[in-house]
Amino acid sequence: MGQFSGGCYLSCGILLFLGLQVPATLARGSRGEALQHGQSGTLPHFLEEPDDAYIVKSNPIKLRCQARPALQIFFKCNGEWVHQSQHSSQEHTDLGTGLKIREVMINVSRQQVEDFHGPEDYWCLCVAWSHLGTSKSRKATVRIAYLRKNFEQDPQGIEVPLKGMIVLHCRPPEGVPVAEVEWLKNEEPVNSDGIIDTRADHNLIISEARLSDSGNYTCLASNIVAKRRSATATVVVYVNGGWSSWTDWSPCNVRCGRGVQKRSRTCTNPAPLNGGAFCEGMSVQKSTCNTLCPVDGGWGEWSEWTVCSAECERQRSRDCTAPEPKHGGRLCDGAALATDNCTGGLCTQNRKLLHDAKPQGVETSSDVALYSGLAAGVVTVVVLIVAVTLYRKNQSEYGVDVIDSSALTGGFQSFSFKTSRQGNPLLINSSLQPDLTVSRTYTSPMCFQDSIDKELMAERSLLDPLPDIKVKGVAERAEYHVMSHPQTFPRGMAPDYSGVAVEATLGRREKSLFITQAPLTPSRPPHKTTGVFGHAGGRLVVPNTGISLLVPHGGIAEDTTWEMYMIINQEDSSTVSEDGQEILLSPEVTYGPPGLDLSCPIAMTIAHCAEAAAGNWTIRLKRQMQDNKWEEVMSVDEESTSCYCLLEAQSCHLLLERPGRYALVGQPLRQEAAKRLRLAVFGSPDTSNPLGFTLRVYCVDDTPHAFQEVAVGERSRGGRLLEEPKMLLFRGNTFSLQVSIQDVPQLLWSIKPFTTCQEFSFSQVWASNQHPLQCAFSLERYSHSSSPLSCKISIRQVKGQEQILQVYTSVVENEKGVVPFFSQSDCTVTSQTGSRAFKIPLSIRQRICATFDTANAKGKDWQLLAQKLHIDRNLCYFACQESPSAVILSLWEAQHQDSGDLDSLASALEEISKVQSSRTTTLGCSNEELDTEFT
């Protein structure tokens, strides 16, 4: 009781000292209340003690205490009691124990903390009273929070090689509480994935640098007051260039004697990136070579005549040894064995000389008989020759089958018209290019080849396996038409040139019958060609465009010539439908003249840009009418007797009978439909800025004509092709095409801001109608010594394909001069007439037509020929032709105008020969009997 009373008196004294009113029950020392509070037998226990706090700006903080059992709780700050008026208290009873719980709070302002000047931080604690005594809480410090603006150490930019170590230092600004540090890369948080360590004293450490680690790094410091950003540090991970393996030595550049061969390597293993060092050393090695010259054979001296034989003949021989043919030289021409008749008493009969066996009178009568017999023999031979000639002529007119098994299998030989592969003249330095993915190259006719192999086709060696055929003479030589020729027309026909746009002069030179609708620049090659053709037929080609025209032999009447032309129309027209569902897939091509009269269809080849293999298109052939409107001629997948379309991956072969303007249009059936784009990047120095360099990226329809437009324009600008063009499939999914430049060495070059990514809308690309799309990137080097440039051009369709064009060039090389874009662009030979215009010799062609145009017991007809040549659709068109086989062969000629290889035709005829043999066995007769029948 004394202890309780003493404790009570002490508590009351303190309360009175603080200016607080002593509770009546406590002052009276009520025994019942004392017993109630004393049953616990413990001092006050703090359920919540004040925590350290920070004052942000001018906002006061609250300190809170909670104790049980407690009669009163007061705060004491910096050793002084806080007045009762500044306390806010609450009291409630613990339902579990029945004890009273008291909670007290005070506010501490920024002014109070700033006014305190003590050896330590501003602090506060709680003192709680009960009947048994007092308890104190922990000290809670109150500090003013802040964060300085300037970093003590900013990270610095660095350039490191691939797999090198990257260390970026960062010391955040001074602050209370201490700032936390976070790293950003290109404004995105950096994740510590085991490769990047951000825990070491706020530093960022990358033990092995990757190309993806290049970027802009920022140190971000933050606490409860603010966030601070450091200066941005640029990290460049560069790759030093390495040489690839040497290529094989090229063939010797001369066919005879001393020449040069070379091999090359490229700085692509790896290619230098981000300003990495270029490869040291030579990219091309040259070596002398010696090619053995061919030695043509020469005849030696004739041997002596042999003794006259019993048949009154003598012989002599010679050898092809003066000199012998070597190293591919030609064999000797002429016969190695000569035979002569013996006369003048040198012949023997019954081992006696003739003049000894017979008297003079008998000898005279014998001479008369001899000469009479010789005369009769000559007459008989002449009659036989005339009879055989008439018989063969009569048989050929009625389509007699003259091809037997040996003719089918031995009448053709394989000839190759391939030329040696040369470096791309468009590239700045073809020997220094990086490894390239396989890209599509055009095999469209650029210029005609004057190959001597074609002359061999009509030689005797080709027809030796055909014993039942005699070929008279050698195929006529081709006629090359470089300039326009006077035109002749059939009697009663007048030329009609209405609506034709082409430059030419016919008849009188002073009168121009054609007017150019679209003037061309002097450097732009004309997209037209003309040629004079007669009964022998020929071929007409627009160079570098994939456009050609084949006039079959016999299509023009004898003693008649036509001056024919082809034009690629440049002006815009309403080829496609107005609803916007169709797009132009090929150039618009016109051939004429309008009054052209041919006995068989011509074969025209047009390049297109549709990805037609997947069957996602409806492709139609359209023709322009006289009112300039376009009519549909046929769909490629339909049957028609008016014309024929053979669609291949890159071109379409047409059999046409009406001159006019034609074009291919396509309507996509689904979003997977795609057209091919050809991508190319050109570069040239900026004429207005000595340190500037411009990259121009082109996206054009994947046809030779469309790309030629780009090449001609770049040649006039002095641009150079910096990378082999590549192909991209652009799908009809309504998504745009994005072009961006990447990996520009930032320490060597700068690029205009907001120009690193450019975009073409879907409609611009999808309906470009053979017109090129162009975007440009303007770069500037920091000094004249920074001549090398390496970067990437990314061209991608959103949610579609992507292609990368690797640029690796030097500004110094670009300033040396311009390389021509087409090595054959100056070729003026655009027409051929006669046998050189065709792959199949005329004699072979006539024999095939005579055999297959009429069905016979051997089962060979034109339908079987079409089937074996894989021309097995729309056969009704050929059935309407006077000579179906001739039209099929014209289509085959158009298909194979570039390959120059007769293997496919020979293989087809060989298969037909096998079919013939099997059917012959079924009919119960032998090949020998059939050969006898048709000989």
Image: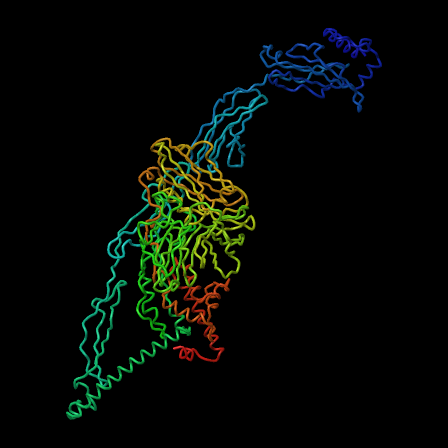
Q: Nearer the viewer, residue 903 or 652?
A: 652
Quadrant for the C terminus, please: bottom left
Position of residue 350 relative to residue 381, above or below, is below
Q: Is residue 791 above or below residue 861?
A: above
Position of residue 674 measured from the top left corner of the image (x, y, whole percent): 51, 49
Q: Nearer the viewer, residue 34 or 561?
A: 561
Q: Residue furthest right?
A: 32
Q: In the picture, which quadrant includes the N terminus?
A: top right
Relative to 720, residue 111 above or below: above
Q: In which image quadrant can residue 177 be found?
A: top right
Q: Nearer the viewer, residue 860 or 102?
A: 860
Residue 717: horizontal and vertical position, in percent?
A: 36, 39
For this rendering, which residue is in front, 724 or 26? 724
Quadrant of residue 453 within the rendered picture: bottom left
* Residue 242 visible in the displayed image: no
Q: Can residue 509 be seen at all in this image of the molecule?
A: yes
Q: Position of residue 203 (x, y in %)?
A: 50, 29
Relative to residue 909, is residue 625 depicted above or below?
Answer: above
